[in-house]
Image (cartoon, helix red, strand yellow):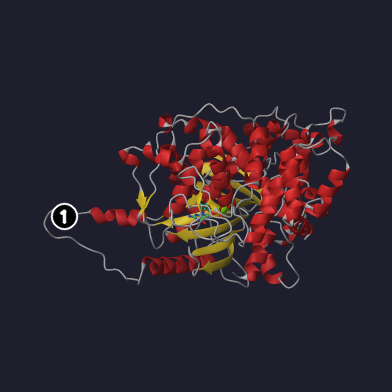
Amino acid sequence: MCLKYLVYKRALCGEVSLPFGFPQNRNAIFPRSHRTVNVCACAYFNSTMAASFGVCRLPMSGSGKFIKLCHGAVPQTQRRLATSTSALPSRTEKQASTAAKGSASFQAIQEERREQAERSVLISCPAKINENKFLDELTKHGTIDKHFFYNSYGTYAVVEFSSRESIASLKESTNIPAVQHEAAVPFKSRLLALKQTGSGSHPVPNFQDQSPPSINDLIKLLSEQDSIDEQLQCLTKALELSEENISLRFLVCSLLRDIAGAYFPECIIRPFGSTVNSFGKLGCDLDMFLDLDGIYASNQKTQGSGLSMEYQVKRGASERVVTQSILSVIGECVDKFGPGCVGVQKILQARCPLVRFAHQPSGFPCDLTANNRVAMKSSELLFLYGTLDPRVRQLVFSVRCWARVHAITSSIPGAWITNFSLTVMVLFFLQQRSPAILPTLDQLMELAGPSDKCVIEGNDCTIVSDVSKITMQNNTDTLLKLLQEFFEFYGNFPFKKSSINIRKGKEEIKPETSPLYIQNPFEITLNISKNVNATQLERFVVLCRESAWLLQQGEVLNRSSNQTADSVPAWGFAALLLPSVTSGAGVKSRRKKKLEPASSRIKNLLDSLKIKGGDTAAKKGSANLRR
Ligand code: GTP
Ligand code: MG
């Protein structure tokens, strides 16, 4: 992995400031006026928390606004939509309405968004753009269905026309810029720049936030809620991808498709992972795969005359070799011709070859893969689980947030637990409840109809598409109970001998000795957490135990009633996000306060921390936070 790229990626995520010695490329990625990458107020949180919330990736237009808007009285749609945005249904509304239609709708939703993206353009605008004049100009080319503005190292607008003809008309009237002392690559993409002569006038549009709240704002917001259940619901709303952010993600895929389409006109670039699996957090990366199936689909043609025609093609030694050469060429084009695509790295020797880059106008770190259908199916599976019960997403968002704050997960590849693994662990835990909150993957397969049959590279990836066939059991556990028991469950899980298997919905004997074994849902001989080492697993277990213990404490569990809204100390889930939770010193000082007696089970857990060297791991965690 190229260190330089990692630094860029981390800087883009707000994790680090770019070090001295990166001036040239730093300018390419962060224009001078937008170079403040680390806005996290609290120095303590700077490294890990800024990373976890991506707080610095896109400039915030005022955290106060976020706090005001998230008080619960304002529905999510209103909260996220600027006045300049036409009324889009909120992601949650849309998801709720489509949940009933089930997994088939997952495909339908993706298709709809893809089609919308193809009718859209991304326009860099002057900072003081007059919105009315802007719309007058654009509507010369046709009716606009939706539009919104956002700031990301510059001011941008996403405009979705009603028809694709409008794009052709707009492109017709757009110039290739005349550049002095340099030469322009005359590539006519749908990333445009609007130039304005004279100063701007009102009305200036409202700008969409594309970044999550800072950790301090989030802790404050959570602490103002009245119950832990409300905290977890509020956290999900604060962090989930907005409808506009998802549209922007599909638009970036569509812009890249235009590049790849020069070679493979039938190709599609599809987003997968957290962009579409319903667990995406503002600031998460954009995982994409180049889908060439449309080309192979045309193989079915027969002439009836006994004659058939074939394309003469180049051949590679294996599918992997072909994938590598396609990605290599597309990566080169993205690098040389892709407007706004910077820091392009071709990582072709990875198990799953990819091209990694930053898309500057959107602020998204991007991974482009090819031939990655199983990952797409995993995204669909996670989406399906996310729609079955609202507590699934709320628990996943909370656990992912908690893990990121404490550096259990990271945006950098390494020996830590990934968000994907963590999500599967939450799903597995929910399958263990009595009655179970989620069905097993085997059950989802049994319910599948003939049209759901799906085999990818020899792996049976069939899952039911008609959600109405799934009978949910009547489990009424509160989020607080689920959170507490999640921590206890994994604080005590026999990782040494057992594996996690959501297909069977039960622990199984580990087939090999990796510290953490989570069976890949579809490629069942693989372990999705093979990368995790014993130290990282131990940190996770220790943190689970501490968090379970903390949630037993009256001081943490209850909001102080005599505090004003401005001075509410972090409590409930917000308290679990404080750095001291992971530090040995923090736990000791909490113990000294002689809080309410913990249950004997939790006391035992704490004792086992001492025995198993938990202090050491906890200290490492704390050092990690300070870095
Ligand atoms: P973020 O951390 O928010 O980006 O979550 P994510 O779910 O997008 O994870 P990531 O970007 O690491 O990976 C993207 C997708 O690739 C996941 O959602 C999975 O579908 C798939 N994936 C990631 N890791 C593995 C793995 O180890 N095995 C398999 N089979 N799929 C994986
Ligand atoms: Mg991802």
Q: Residue 145, image x and y in percent?
A: 52, 37
Q: Quadrant of residue 596?
A: top right
Q: Residue 414, image x and y in percent?
A: 62, 62
User: Is residue 310 shown above or below 167?
Assistant: below
Residue at the spot 43% in from the left edge and 45% down from the top edge: 165
Q: Residue 88, image x and y in percent?
A: 56, 34
In this picture, residue 340 sits left or right of residue 588: left
Q: Quadrant of residue 560?
A: top right
The answer to whether residue 34 of the structure is visible from this angle is: yes
- Residue wearing tag 1: 303
Label 1: few (<14), some (14–19) or many (≥20) C-alpha neighbours in 10 Å: few
Judge by depth and name the residue closer to the eye, 108 or 454.
454
User: Is residue 198 shown above or below 208?
Assistant: below
User: Is residue 438 shown above or below 152?
Assistant: above
The secondary element bearing badge 1 is classed as loop
Residue at the spot 81% in from the left edge and 48% down from the top edge: 587
Query: The C terminus appears in which quarter of the rendering?
Result: bottom right
Furthest toward the left, the residue is 305
Q: Residue 26, image x and y in percent?
A: 69, 66
Residue at the spot 58% in from the left edge and 55% down from the top edge: 496
- For badge 1, the amino acid type reads Gln
Judge by depth and name the residue closer to the eye, 561 or 362.
561
